[in-house]
Image (cartoon, rainbow, N blue to C red):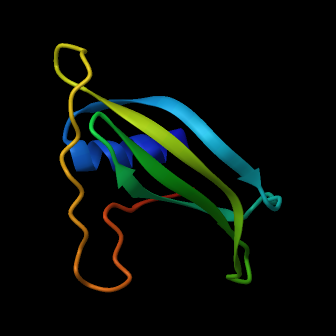
Amino acid sequence: MDEAATICAMRHNRNLVVTASVDDVYFLAPSTVGDRIIITASINRVFSSSLEVGVVVKNCNIAGEKNVINKAFFTMVSLGADGKVTAFPKLKIPSAPGNSACIVYLAS
């Protein structure tokens, strides 16, 4: 989940980021051996030098049913090349309905 949040924040920032905190981790259901795991990360809000990324984990069983099994919120901080905190660019919301600012899909 942290990797998905990091990829999402770095795609928005085009710079290094670090995880500052993880909040509200919910374990909603188990996953079984053989399930595909889909991790989706999206930017919820951008502050000056940090942003919040929401991460949702779904499993997809052999019948094709998808269930949310885990979710959490990550606060990411932007770092410049010198390792010091830098500002994130403002968030531009896509105009098409249903689009998210940044979504990362990872499957195993």
Q: Report the number of numbered marks.
A: 0
Specify the farthest residue to the front: 48
Quarter the C terminus occupies: bottom right
Q: Nearer the viewer, residue 58 or 87?
A: 87
In the rendered view, would you say 86 is above or below 13? Answer: above
Residue 13, x across and y down, in percent: 22, 43
Q: Residue 70 location, x and y as percent?
A: 69, 56
Rendered residue at 18%/46% (across/down): 89
Q: Nearer the viewer, residue 75 or 59?
A: 75
The correct choice, above or below, for 42 with respect to 52 in the image is below
Query: Taking 32 as reference, is 53 above or below it?
Result: above
Q: Which residue appears at 16% of the width and 20% of the height?
A: 81
Q: Left of 73 or right of it: where is 93?
A: left
**Where does residue 101 sit, x and y in percent of width and height?**
31, 64
Residue 94: % across, % down: 23, 74
Quadrant in the picture for residue 1 = top right
Seen from the viewer's position, the closer of residues 77 and 31 is: 77
Residue name at image x 39 percent, y 56 percent? 43
Where residue 21 sits, quadrant-wise, is top right
Q: Is residue 38 left or right of residue 64?
A: left
Q: Residue at x 56, y 48 (%)?
A: 73
Q: Give the quarter of the image for residue 102.
A: bottom left
